[in-house]
Amino acid sequence: MLQIRNAADILKGGGLVAFPTETVYGLGADALRPEAAKKIYAAKGRPSDNPLIIHIAEFEALFRIVKEIPPQARLLADAFWPGPLTMIFQKSEIVPYETTGGLDTVAVRMPDHPAALALIRESGGYIAAPSANTSGRPSPTLAEHVAEDLDGRIPLILDGGAVGIGIESTIIDLSCMSKTADGEWIADEIPLVLRPGYITREMLAEVIGTVGDDPGLADENAHPKAPGMKYRHYAPKAEMIIVSGEREDVIRRINELAEENCQRGEKTGVICTEETKEQYRADFIRSTGSRSDEGSIARHLYAVLREMDTLGADRIYSENFSALRIGNAVMNRLLKAAGHHVVEV
Ligand code: TXA
Ligand code: MG
């Protein structure tokens, strides 16, 4: 509790604190103070047009920071908050443009983590927080990852151990909803998922009806609606390639490629699963989890990407994963890490 109070004092003084959430570690600042939010961009080396998510601890906290609350927000909050879902709304006046990257909309989430909720409550109710990595690196899933990237740049890292989910929250855009003069809600378009995560489009649709996917997710050349999704995120230093196809073909092809790299004097990393890890011959072989438990793959993916960097692989090959449930979010992050470089076998 003392740690939380120290952290809250730093935030109230306009400083930065890294803290655990259930998805990934966040780098927090007081969301309603422009100069505090600006420090986040400096510490991460983040482009200033990439907006931050505001973290709240009570549904009622929404009233101050959004213009109006569409009915879907209540339904989704009842179903998924606290939890790994971020909703986008029209912002109110008090939210500074430094927090929203110059946009008139604001992203809000209520994390499902006791330390995060306690910190939000102690520090005034509104913490702006992106993932606590330096820009372009995989999001941190351990306090040690935060230290790797940000040690010396921030005064405090709250250590909550390993996160539970390991991949950033699902983002749904509700800013398409507006209220008419006679108080009726109308939708300019259907709500879209801007970033896939643990909460799938199907789970959202069960609660509020039709939900779409931002076309920018599937088409690497389309313009994504979440500014952050356009950057080559989660990028390991090595060249990364996803090898996709029948399991046995994938293993055979990756082993061939590893052999060719070896002859050229290059080091190969392989990202695979518990089920296949014994079948590879390469310099660095890392399992991210078991195919019988998709959650385990999500939980370890970023740590494995970070490890590949420190091992010094020249090329990384990854198996492809089923795009079902959280597997869809795993593939979304892997495709970004690989710059959409996929080899079909
Ligand atoms: O799980 C999470 O969401 C983690 C934890 C710390 O809460 N946070 C996180 O933040 O992933 P960050 O900054 O790494 O990703 C936020 C994403 C970016 O892609 C950003 O462009 C998008 O949300 N975003 C934020 N505000 C937005 C807005 N008003 N309109 C569209 N996209 C927005
Ligand atoms: Mg991030």
Image (cartoon, rainbow, N blue to C red):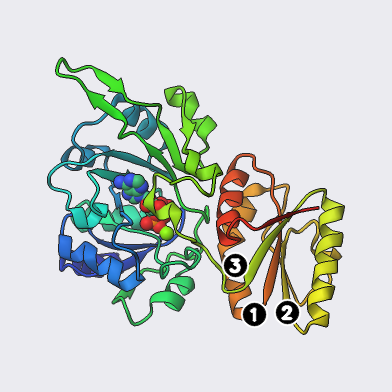
300 lies left or right of 15: right
Q: Quadrant of ligand 2?
A: bottom left
Marker count (numbered): 3
User: Given the image, on which type of amino acid does mark 2 rest?
Assistant: Lys
First in sequence: mark 2 vs mark 3? 2
Residue indicated by mark 1: 311
In terms of secondary structure, where does tag 1 sit? helix
Residue placed most toward the observer, 282 or 258: 258
Residue indicated by mark 2: 267
Quadrant in which residue 131 is drawn? bottom left
> Which of the numbered marks, if any, corresponds to residue 305?
3
Q: Where's the N terminus, which quadrant?
A: bottom left
Q: Say if mark 1 contacts mark 2, CB within 8 Å.
A: yes
Query: What residue is drawn where x is 30% and y is 35%?
Result: 175
Question: How far across and down, in percent of the image, does residue 297 sit?
Answer: 64, 55
Distance between the alpha carbons at the discs numbered 2 and 3: 15 Å
Density class for disc 1 (Cα within 10 Å; few <14, some 14-19, many ≥20) is: few
Single out the mark in the foreground, 2 or 3. 2
The answer as to whether callout 1 falls within 8 Å of ligand 2 is: no
